[in-house]
Each structure stands twice: as structure tokens, then as C-alpha cells.
Amino acid sequence: MPRSQSSAGESRRVVSASARPYGGRSLKERLAERRARLLDAGLTLFGTRGYTATSIELVCSKAGVTARHFYEQFASREELLLEVYEGVIDRTRKAVVTALHRSHSTPRHRVTAGLDAYVHAVLDDPRYARIACVEVVGASARVERRRRKTIYEIASLIEAQAQALADQGRVARRDFSLTAIAMAGACNELVTDAIMRPTPPPTSALVDALVRLFLAVIAASTPEIRPKRRRRKAAP
């Protein structure tokens, strides 16, 4: 038998054997479990040691898989970082959207709920904060593009809230896009500062600072909607 045919036959037998149920689990279930372990290992190692200090070998050791198993799931360490980062973003987005969709008695309560959800979603687990605010910064051109996209996604959510206030007549109508980007940057930088300090400030202080900033730059009354004072006529 030609060697090429023999190699092809051996390859098919390996694939067929790996596809068989093992330990009561199908191949699909085993692959999903390995992926979950790799993502969890990436979250822990990137969020504690840092991205540059974490090798693929270290990730595999932490996850209890081989290098072959790693490359079945991810093309590179960068791709793993992106997947872990997506998980952080998704967790934060869901927390904020859920908070905003609840009933709120006043715009201030609504703003506070959204910002409180953001701060807690990122800071309650230090690994999330480090990955979102430190490890993805400058990791690679591809990761940086995703980070910039995240800033715009946060800004879009802030802009939508500001526009809703304008639709209710609570603030003057204007283009909120640049202000929303500035606010998104403030959220990111305040969280970054908190995790870099030897003694982080309480989350309540961070939320209060962000609420005050939001109300000052977006939701505060503006000259366009303040009632004009009537000048008193001089007495004859």
C-alpha cells in the first residue's frame, strides 16, 4: 500500500477514535469542557500574572490540557485573550442593560443604577478589571482595535440614555456623541485608577463621582431649556 494512503488511513482512525464517547461524554462535550477550562485559565492568569507573563504552556498547565488541545480551540494566545475579553464585555453589558431596563422613579435613579451596575460588573472581580482596563491596552493591533470598539459601544449606550432624556424634554436636544465618548473614557479611567491604587476607594465613591459627572456634562439643565426670567418693568 502506498505510504500516502496508509497515512490517510491512520489519520481517519485517530479522528474516528477521538470522536467516540469517552467517560460518558461525546467529543462535542469534551471539546466544550476543554474550551471552558482554557477560558477560565486565561481569565485567571491574564487577570493576575498578566498577558505578557503568561505563556501558552502555562495556560495549558492551569487548564489541565495539552498544547494540541489548546490549538484545537484557539489559534494563538492573542485569540484566547480576545475571547476572555469578550466575556468580560458581555458580562458588563448584560449587567448595565438589565439595570437600565428596571423601573426608575427619576432620571438620576436610572443613571445611578446603570453606572452602579457598570462599576460592580468590572470591579467585583479584580481579574475582570485588570483584563478590561490594563491587559488589553497595547497587547496587539488586533486587540487594540477591539478595545477601541468597546469604548464606542459604551459611548453609544451613554448617548442613547442622554438622547432619551432629551426626548423627555429634560435636557436640550444636541449631538451627544463626543460627550458620550468622553464619558466612556472617564468610566474606563476611573476604574483603571481604582485598581492601580494601593488602597482602592470604595465602589460607592466611584459610582457617586461618575453620576455627578454624567449629570454635569449631559443631564444638567442647560441655558436652552431654563425658563427665562422676566425683567421687571421700571416703575413710572
Image (cartoon, rainbow, N blue to C red):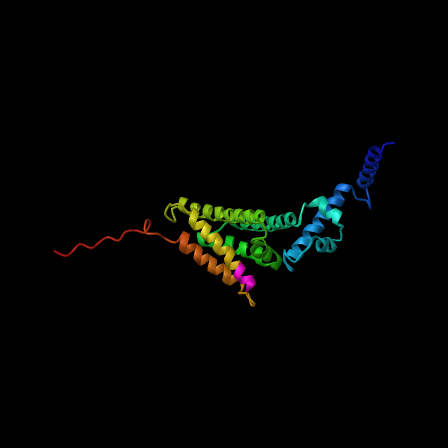
Q: Quadrant of the C terminus?
A: bottom left
Of residues 155 and 141, which is closer to you in this image? 141
Q: Residue 130, percent across and down?
A: 59, 58
Please give left or right for residue 130 compared with residue 73 in the image.
left
- What's drawn in magenta, residue-wise? 192-196
Res 197 quadrant in image: bottom right
Q: Residue 143, percent across and down?
A: 58, 49
Please give left or right for residue 224 compared with residue 128 in the image.
left
Q: Please identify the residue farthest to the front as the structure is shown.
A: 2
Residue drawn 47% across the image and 60% down it: 209
Residue drawn 60% across the image and 48% down it: 86
Specify the principal SS of the magenta part: helix
Q: Please identify the residue farthest to the left as the structure is shown.
A: 236
Q: Is residue 167 above or below residue 60?
A: above
Instruction: Tell me if I can see residue 154 in this picture.
Output: yes
Q: Please identify the residue farthest to the bottom as the structure is shown.
A: 199
Instruction: Tell me if I can see residue 102 in this picture.
Output: no
Q: Quadrant of the N terminus?
A: top right
Q: Please identify the residue farthest to the right as the structure is shown.
A: 1
Is 43 one of the magenta-colored residues? no
Residue drawn 62% across the image and 48% down it: 82
Q: Residue 191, percent across and down?
A: 53, 59
